[in-house]
Amino acid sequence: AQKITQTQPGMFVQEKEAVTLDCTYDTSDPSYGLFWYKQPSSGEMIFLIYQGSYDQQNATEGRYSLNFQKARKSANLVISASQLGDSAMYFCAMREGRPGGSEKLVFGKGTKLTVNP
Amino acid sequence: DADVTQTPRNRITKTGKRIMLECSQTKGHDRMYWYRQDPGLGLRLIYYSFDVKDINKGEISDGYSVSRQAQAKFSLSLESAIPNQTALYFCATSDPSGGALNEQFFGPGTRLTVL
């Protein structure tokens, strides 16, 4: 079974609008971390935002926020006020176990976001 | 200067050739990782190393080997390259003392084509 599922191969959004990229995860470990990375066409992996399994509040980083619904095992990325530069692949990833433990990341297959002017 | 560097950035090779991809980091991190990215499949872990004396297989280690020459250097080798090893390869580092976040820092990637 896939540990990280991103069901949207591609998404389109108009500039200045908000968009939600879906991510569901599967783990039986009570301690885990969820990450979102952005990969522009140039290829580099850019860390965006992190949510720990014990964090009480949803993570936010500027225009990025993470809609963490633990019971549903979902960690959706919300990008507010989309910009043309947000066009990229977006990957959700999970680290199982406590920080400082195995540290291995499992990635989803990604969602390609296109921001239209 | 980039904290995590990979050489070469692009490589075209032929089936059966031995090839080495190199990763260097100046972040002082003990932990290093090699991933490959295939279109539509995301990133998959090949090998990881928690220190110079610790090497571990990841999800897809068959056909690959690694060497951790120093804390700062982690090399990935394809002993006999085959076309389905054509992919984008990433090196990453992390610091276990980095707190709850403990993000992985990625190199720029090496695009490998095996003909």
Image (cartoon, coloured by chain):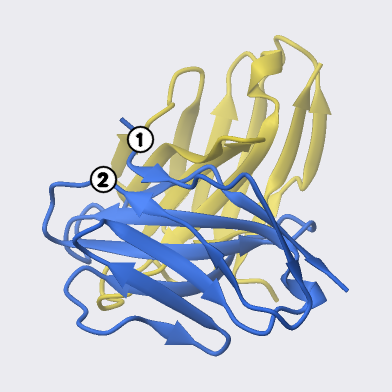
Chain colours: A blue, B yellow
| Dot 1: element | loop
**Where residue B105 appears, x then y in whole percent?**
51, 65
- Seen in the picture, residue B33 relative to A2 is either above or below; the reply is below
Indicate the chain on which mark 2 is placed: A
Q: Quadrant of the N terminus of chain A?
A: top left
Q: Which of B41 and B77 is in front in this view?
A: B41
- Kind of residue at badge 1: Gln
Q: Name the residue under label 2.
A: A26
Looking at the image, residue B22 sits to the left or right of residue A26; the answer is: right
Q: Please, what secondary structure does the residue beneath circle 2 have?
A: loop
User: Image height check: is B16 above or below B74?
Assistant: above
Label 2: how many Cα within 10 Å (few below 14, some 14–19, many 20+):
some
Q: Is residue A87 left or right of residue A22?
A: right
Q: Which residue is drawn at 19% across and 61% down?
A: A71
* Chain letter of disc 1 in the image: A
Q: Mark 1 points at which residue?
A: A2
Q: In which quarter of the image is residue A12?
A: bottom right
Quadrant of res B58: top left
Could you say which disc has been placed on residue B53 in the image?
none
- In this image, A49 relative to B97: left or right? right
Could you tell me which residue is drawn at 61 percent across and 64 percent down? A38
**Residue A58 location in percent, x, y?**
33, 81
Cα distance, mark 2 to mark 1?
7 Å
CB contact under 8 Å: marks 2 and 1: yes
